[in-house]
Structures are given as structure tokens and as C-alpha cells.
Image: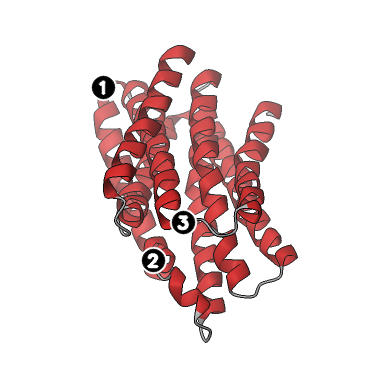
Amino acid sequence: MQMVFITALGVGGATVIGAIIGFVFKRLSHRFSDIVLAFAAGIMLAAAVLGLILPAVEYGGDLGLLYAVLGIFAGALCLNLIDKLVPHLHKLMGAEQEFHQGGERLSKVLLFVTAIAIHNLPEGIAAGVGFGSGNVSEALFIAGGIALQNIPEGMVIIGPMLSAGVKPSRTFLCALVTGLVEVVGTLLGYFAVSLSQAILPFALAFAGGTMLYVISDEMIPETHAHGSERGATYALLVGFCVMLVSDVLLG
């Protein structure tokens, strides 16, 4: 349990680390942001497939493939429902220029931060569910991948908030809240699987499905929206390969 709590703090703290970097580099170019975010998407993709979906098939036995498919679509549908309640991240991120034009810029920034906080919950759950398998190295692989992609996520929320006139102290507080959401998600995922090992295969695939949904629906469209598609594509591949090598070495 102590390892789970430390990991939860690490996963959530990565967002705060990203926010601190965001304060240092307030004006990030679209190209740089897209490449960093694409690298994070590659890490997230590898963590979803190698750390969650494939283990779901393995732990599910004869029905593992069925559990995996059902879990993936259940996770995607869950986030699809959330997206109906909260605007898409890539739409809000794409509207960054409007943050400088007064009027509704502050409300858009707050929606942007709220959307990130809500989408951090399933990522935290994915990190917690990983510990339910009893394979600590595999769980740390998943959590490490999520933490790595949280850093650029923390970076991108700072500039728009400061540009909208939010005080630095409140900006940092918002970043801290988004990180705390991930801590809560990690603990929820761990306790849910601990209560019943029978749901482990489905829970792993569900978490993987939520991550695949975020990558396809939000991260990739955002990284391809500003003319940096080629660099973003290679950055995604680099992120995926970094996690692939890490998985082989840890295994």
C-alpha cells in the first residue's frame, strides 16, 4: 500500500513538475508544444497497449480476449460520455489565440483546466489498476509512462492561464488540483481491483481504452493542428519506443 501511495504522489506530482517548467517557459511555440505532446502520446500509447491491454488478455485466461475488447470499448464510451459534458481538450487548446483577445478568454481557460482535470482521473485509475495484478515492475511501468506524459500536460496549462490574467499563485493551485485528481484516481483504481481480483482483466482493458481514446481523440489532433505533423509523428514513435525499450529491460 505504501508503494501505491508513493506512486500516486509521483504520478500527480509529475503534473506539478510540468507546471513549474511551464512557469519558466511561459511562451512555448506551437511546434515545440506539439512535439512534446506527441512524445507524451507515444508514451501513453505504449503504456496502454503493453502495460494494460496485453496483460488484460493474459490475466483473463480463455476469456481474456473478450474481456479486453469489451473493456477497451467500455473505457472509450465512458470518456465519450465525459466529452459530452466537458468540451474537447484539442478544441480548447486550439483556441489559445483567443485567450489574448479578452471577453471570454478566462472562462475558456477554466474550461480547459477543468477538462484536463477530469481526463486525469482515468489516467490515475490506470496507474492504480496496474498494481492490482501484483506485478510491481509492470505497475511501475504503467505509472512511469503516465507520469512522463503528465509533465508536458502540466506545461501547457500555465501559459494560457497567465495570459488570461490569472494570478501565478492561483495558476499553480489549478495545476496542483489537476495533479491531485490523478492521485485520487490512482487510489480508486487500486482499491477497486483489490476488492475483487475477478474484475482485473476488464479493469485493465477499461483503463487502456480510456487512454487510447484520449490519444486518438485529443492528443493526436492537437499535435497535427499547427503544421508540425511530421515532427509530431516521429516524436510519437520515439515516445513509444522509449517505453518499449523500458518494458523489455524491466521485463
Q: What residue sits 41% from the left and 32% below the top?
A: 47
Location of residue 166 with respect to 44 vertically, above or below: below
Could you say whether the residue bearing mark 1 is in a helix, strand or loop?
helix
In the rendered structure, which disc, 2 or 1, sits on the residue that comes first in sequence? Answer: 1
Q: Determine whether, in the image, residue 121 is placed left or right of residue 244.
A: right
Number of the label disc, if any, that sits on residue 94: 2
Q: Is the image coloured rainbow, by chain, by secondary structure, or in one colour?
A: secondary structure
Three-letter amino acid code at the position of disc 2: Gly
The picture quadrant where one finds residue 176 is bottom right
- Point out the residue furthest to the right here: 169
> What residue is disc 1 on?
62
> What residue is disc 3 on?
29
Q: Nearer the viewer, residue 184 or 245?
A: 245
Inter-mark Cα distance, 2 to 3: 13 Å
Q: Nearer the viewer, mark 2 or mark 1?
A: 2
**How many numbered marks have been drawn onto this rendered protein structure?**
3
Location of residue 162 with respect to 201 vertically, above or below: below
Q: Determine whether, in the image, residue 41 is placed left or right of residue 22.
A: left
Inter-mark Cα distance, 2 to 1: 44 Å
Three-letter amino acid code at the position of disc 1: Asp
The location of residue 118, given as percent across then percent down, is: 51, 58
User: Few, some or many C-alpha atoms within 10 Å of disc 3 (few <14, some 14-19, many ≥20)?
Assistant: few
Q: Determine whether, in the image, residue 141 is placed left or right of residue 60.
A: right
Three-letter amino acid code at the position of disc 3: Ser
Can residue 221 be seen by looking at this rendering?
yes
Could you say whether the residue bearing mark 2 is in a helix, strand or loop?
helix
In the rendered structure, which disc, 2 or 3, sits on the residue that comes first in sequence? Answer: 3
The location of residue 231, given as percent across then percent down, is: 32, 43
Q: Nearer the viewer, residue 21 or 61?
A: 21
